[in-house]
Image (cartoon, rainbow, N blue to C red):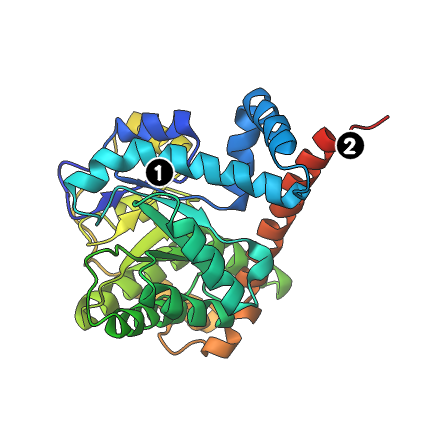
Amino acid sequence: MTEQFPQTALWNDSIDPVELRESLGWGAVGATCNPVIALAAIRADLPRWQRRLRELAEELPTATESQLGWRVVEELTVEGARLLEPVFAAQGGRNGRVSVQTDPRLFRDPEALVRQAVHFSGLAPNVIVKIPATPAGIVAIEEATARGVSINATVSFTVAQAVAVAEAVERGIARRGGDDSELGSVATIMGGRLDDWLRTCASRTSTLLPPGYLDWAGVATLKRAHEIFQARGYRTRVLAAAFRNHLPLTELVGGDLVISPPTAWQRAVNAADLPLESRIDVPVAPEVVETLTRLVPEFSRAYEPDGLAVAEFGDFGATRHTLRQFLAADADLDALVRDLLVPAP
């Protein structure tokens, strides 16, 4: 894919250094992360990070368990940034970036999000900072962009959120005098998580849909967002995340966007040797869109550009579900550090 469709960027949905190196061998040019992924990366090499946490605890005797855990996340980020430095230099900052996500506990506080985003942006020149597409997050995205932070909007599932992110980035760039040379912002749509939420909605109302239709909801939303971004000339790219099947790859190749599957999905796709052709401009079957619109009202809220007001972003079901998962991962990281600082008797 990376050779046949160079305008479609492959990023790896993990900053685990072993997985990132593997993905780079397949042509990946970036990496994404979130609290769940960061915790998984730490657990995948637990003896190493336990040693490092003990060292940090000695160096920082007054640091809280949360502060120590986030120091490890920062070190993981810097390690990933080094691996991607050659791509960053070769592509002038458009790719070659590693994502680090702001603390999910800050999702209601734009000033705190901006402070952390600016701090994270200083970890390495090729860091891109994930800020949630909540009402407070949209405010923070504009301000952080104005301060020169490259943005990866996350906790985002809808066309309305992606458009609000792109508009916020444009306002931030305008405040910088129109200079976007240091930036490479993306607006994530977590298509698979949208599919998951719509399945939940259909189950709650005992709605029966034709087999496979719900697999297309996230893809349809991503295609529509990409179409709007291209028509309006946004300097932000759409990023497809949260794979549940191969459709975000086979249906989006050819687009000027980012596709970010986990390493395991990349292995599976490579083993399957799927035939790839540019399908970004091929619409999802009208009967699928019509059926989803008619039977699952939450799909319309995701698919229509005006389906959600900014004030509603935090209350969308997929947003609440994902924030709870990210907050739980934060708590699990705290617990991991706590078990080192205060071992059970």
Instruction: Give the residue displayed 28% in from the left and 49% down from the top.
Output: 258
* Whole-number angstrom distance, CA of label 2 to CA of label 1: 35 Å
The amino acid sitting under disc 1 is Asn
The local crowd at label 1, few if under 14, some if 14 to 19, many if 20 or more residues have their Cα within 10 Å, is many
Viewport quadrant of the C terminus: top right
Give SS at disc 2.
Answer: loop
Relative to 7, does residue 52 appear above or below in the rendering?
above
Instruction: Give the residue displayed 26% in from the left and 36% down from the top.
Output: 85
Q: Verify CB contact (< 8 Å) between mark 2 and mark 1.
A: no
The x and y percentages for residue 244 are 44, 44
Residue 165 falls in which quadrant of the image? Answer: bottom left
The amino acid sitting under disc 2 is Val
Q: Nearer the viewer, residue 194 or 199?
A: 194
Viewport quadrant of the N terminus: top left
Q: What residue sits right under mark 2 in the picture?
A: 342
Residue furthest out toward the right? 345
For this view, does 265 lie left or right of residue 325? left
Task: Report the mark closest to the observer, 2 or 1.
Answer: 2
The x and y percentages for residue 300 are 43, 72
For residue 243, which numbered disc appears in the image? none
